[in-house]
Image (spheres, rainbow, N blue to C red):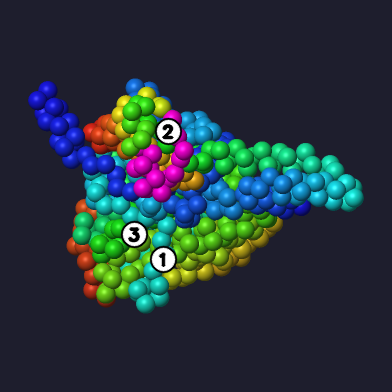
Amino acid sequence: MQSIIERIEKEIAAWTPQEGAEEVGIVRAAGDGIAEVDGLSKAVLSEMVLFDPTFDRPLTEALKDPAPLYGLVLNLEEDSVRTVILGDASKVYEGMLVRRLGRLLSVPVGESLIGRVINPLGEPVDGKGATGAQLVRPIEREAYGVIDRAPVNAPLHTGIKAVDAMIPIGRGQRELVIGDRGTGKTSIAIDTILNQKNEPAATRPICIYVAIGQKESKTAKIVAELSERGAMDYTIVVTASASASAALQFLAPFTGATIGEYFMEQGKDALVVYDDLSKQAVAYRQMSLLLRRPPGREAYPGDIFYLHSRLLERAAKLSKERGGGSLTALPIIETQEGDVSAYIPTNVISITDGQIYLEANLFNKGQRPAINVGISVSRVGSAAQTKAMKKVSGKIKLELAQFRELEAFMQFSSDLDAETKKRIDAGRRMTSVLNQPRGVPMPFEMQAATIFAAINGYLDSFPPSEISTIETKLQDYLTREGDGILANIRESKEMSEETEMALRAALDTFITRHTPVA
Amino acid sequence: MIDTYTRLLETVAELEDAPTADHAVHKLILHLRSAGRMRMLPEIVRELRKIAARKHALRPRVEVAHEKEATHALAAAAASGISATRAIVNPALISGWRAQKAGVLVDRSAKRALVDIYQNIIA
């Protein structure tokens, strides 16, 4: 009791009346999460305002609901401003007082957010109390310029063989994950986060998963999985669920980028997953239409491209002078019926440094991840690929593309020549090797060793249907008996001649032990 | 067009010169009649009502908790650039005063102080 009294006395002693006048406005109209406010003649774009329900109510009523309700100024008009309400819009009423806060919309950032689930305003939603983050940063800011950046040169391993071998991602890159619903887009992102556990603690990226317009149950499941697998130790989840206002869904990716930038500026690496930007675009369209901005193609506003380009441009690899940190972005886009030529997908494809295209047909055939290698590409990642991976994965993409061609012919002809049959079997075997269930990311040294075995014919004596079993046995064997080889690859990040010879010897032994009896 | 006429009448009204205002309204009606646009008149009236309501909401206003504080409040508000002819008694302020005009608020009431302290404590 004494401490409470002391706390209150301290507050009373510290209180000083606000000097000068405040700038305020009056809500003229409110609805659909938008408020039109008279009187804020000096308000600036993206400024935060506070809807004050205490102004015209008696004190006892005013204190019943003291939670602040913020708004964001998005339209400056001739004699009023239009704001989006960041919270429960039903609490805003005509005649309500609105105060200018004189600061751009900002969110808390810092190490204390790691392991937490927050909303786009930085408020905790995981029931673990205040985040304790002291620093705040504006969520909208200009991206780093050319001088401040360095080329992407370090790999960000996803732990997914097909991605790390054929569509490598570099730290600081923006790689789009695109596909229909239910094709495994989120799985790729989550596996990438889980795989960072395999990275040394010093270089492990801080991961930020931004859930936009997702079901609360799906986000809860993801958080549970990340916690269970120990990935929340380096992950922050920002969630604006499907039930959140359009304004919060629009802001969520910017919050993720702001938090990621903080770590980048500390010289660390960060990874941010935007799951997904299609829903953000829909939320922005809703807001824009309610703000009476003119609609364009598919009713999206004219600045929808700029919305995504200014967000994704914030992903960067900073120069040494700037600390050398990086922010990698994995935006996700959901297509309809595989149509990548729709408005938002083409926009984001043109902004990013490559895309991983997931196909429903491949998914239904049982390929995991269901990546269409033909149209998936990484424009800068190969420069960041480790030498070991580059050495073993050089020809895979071409071979797989040839296999897909032959596979199409195979449906029309059962009488194939030996060479074609051999190529098809090799393609099937490679497809099986690249098949990887969800939630089992693989360290890159193991990926390199497995792919080395596959492309050098060590698995040719096994039928394609048995490849996955053999692969598991091979990995067990290498973990048990080839630890020195794996450690070598891991540390040097390349496949030296000695390592290659040792690996070949280990593989020969393995094959001798496991070759099927004719 | 409606907007232009409304702005014109608003500007005339700001002159606070009744004969000029009457003359302007008369001329406008004659113009609308000759142009066959009398249908615009109700729209113009609606817009003028909106403007009047907005001006009313943003008018200079001084509130005091008790009648006895009125003189001091009016003088203090005037010193802050908000001049009103009389103060309105609002017991919800508990004590002190507050003044408001066209997007500017000066709040020296006990209620505001208590709300601030309360919010700082629970924050």
Please tell me how crowded label 3 is: few (under 14), some (14-19), or many (20+) other residues with Cα within 10 Å: many
Q: Is residue A179 left or right of residue A325?
A: right
Secondary structure beneath disc 1? loop
Kindly report which numbered mark, 1 or 2, lies closer to the viewer in this rendering.
2
* Residue A372 seen in this snapshot: no
Give the label on residue A261, or none: 3
Dividing the picture into quarters, in which one does residue A217 lie?
top left
Q: Farthest residue in the left direction?
A: A2
Please, is residue A195 above or below residue A395 in the view? above
Image location (x, y in percent) of residue B86: 45, 34
Q: Which mark is residue B87?
A: 2
Q: Residue furthest front?
A: B19
Task: Give the residue type that dot 2 points to.
Answer: Ala
Q: Residue at coordinates 49% horizontally, 46% vertically from top-left?
A: B102
> Which residue is at a point 40% across and 72% down the rendered structure image?
A145
Callouts 3 and 1 in the same chain: yes
Left or right, A486 with reference to A288? left
- Of helix, strand and loop, which one carries label 2? strand
Residues B86 and B49: in front is B86
Q: Which residues are magenta?
A: B73-88
**Disc 1: which residue:** A143
Q: Amino acid at mark 3?
A: Glu
Which chain is indicated by disc 3? A
Distance between mark 3 and mark 2 Cα atoms: 52 Å
Q: Amino acid at mark 1?
A: Ala
Depth check, front residue: B28 or A46:
B28
| Residue at image coords 36%, 48% | B79
Residues under labels 1 and 2: Cα distance?
52 Å
Residue A21 coordinates in the image, percent (x, y): 37, 47
| A9 to the left or right of A65 | left
Q: Where is A23 relative to A419, above or below?
A: above
